[in-house]
Amino acid sequence: MKNRQVSSSAIFREEQRFTQPWLWALLLGGLAVSLAAAYPLIVKFQQIDCPVPLSLWLSIVFPPALMLLIITLFALTRLATEVRPEGIAVSFRPLQFQPKLIPFSEIADYQSVTYRPILEYGGWGIRRGRTGYAYNVSGNRGLLLTLKGGKTFLIGSQQPERLKAAMDSAFRSRPVG
């Protein structure tokens, strides 16, 4: 795999994707509706042997093309979490080119939590809630970091206990000073 910046000293690594069946049904349903709406127009213009004006052609092609672009973006999106000796790194590829590293020196506390994605953060993705940011792709469990400034940073995880155990191990063995 190209362009992966995986730390060779990572204590823990998790990569997640959008895998919810309801989400894929919604996306593929949107594509089907946009194709079903475009098809009769294309057939009609072929039957009357009339050139299609560019503006109309774009209005026929744009919705399915947009849906394909959105589906591709969801298919390529990955939430990668790494616990490293210097801190925890998260990236939401391909939307983020560089991982966001939160050094242990900025973390006041952390805990494994069950949360309500829609009520607390407005859903999944890179989200902003009342007290801080959340990076999540599915589920309702994760690691909640409380930063020294009082803000929080939630990292969704399918393995929150393993993530917390890796944080415990890295936090204990970090250099002090």
Image (cartoon, rainbow, N blue to C red):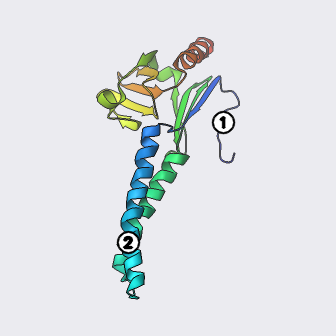
Which type of secondary structure does the marked residue at label 1 adopt? loop
Q: Which residue is mark 2?
A: 40
Q: Amino acid at mark 1?
A: Val
Position of 61 with respect to 79 (left or right) is left
Q: Position of residue 21 (x, y in %)?
A: 47, 38
Q: Which residue is depicted at the point 38% across and 22% down?
A: 115
Comes first in the chain, label 2 or label 1: 1
Q: Nearer the viewer, residue 53 or 45?
A: 45
Q: Which residue is mark 1?
A: 6
Cα distance between the residues tagged 2 and 1? 49 Å
Which type of secondary structure does the marked residue at label 2 adopt? helix
Using the image, determine if residue 104 lies above or below residue 32: above
Q: Position of residue 1 (x, y in %)?
A: 69, 45
Q: Position of residue 4 (x, y in %)?
A: 65, 42
In front: mark 2 or mark 1?
2
Q: Which residue is depicted at the point 55% across and 42% down?
A: 98
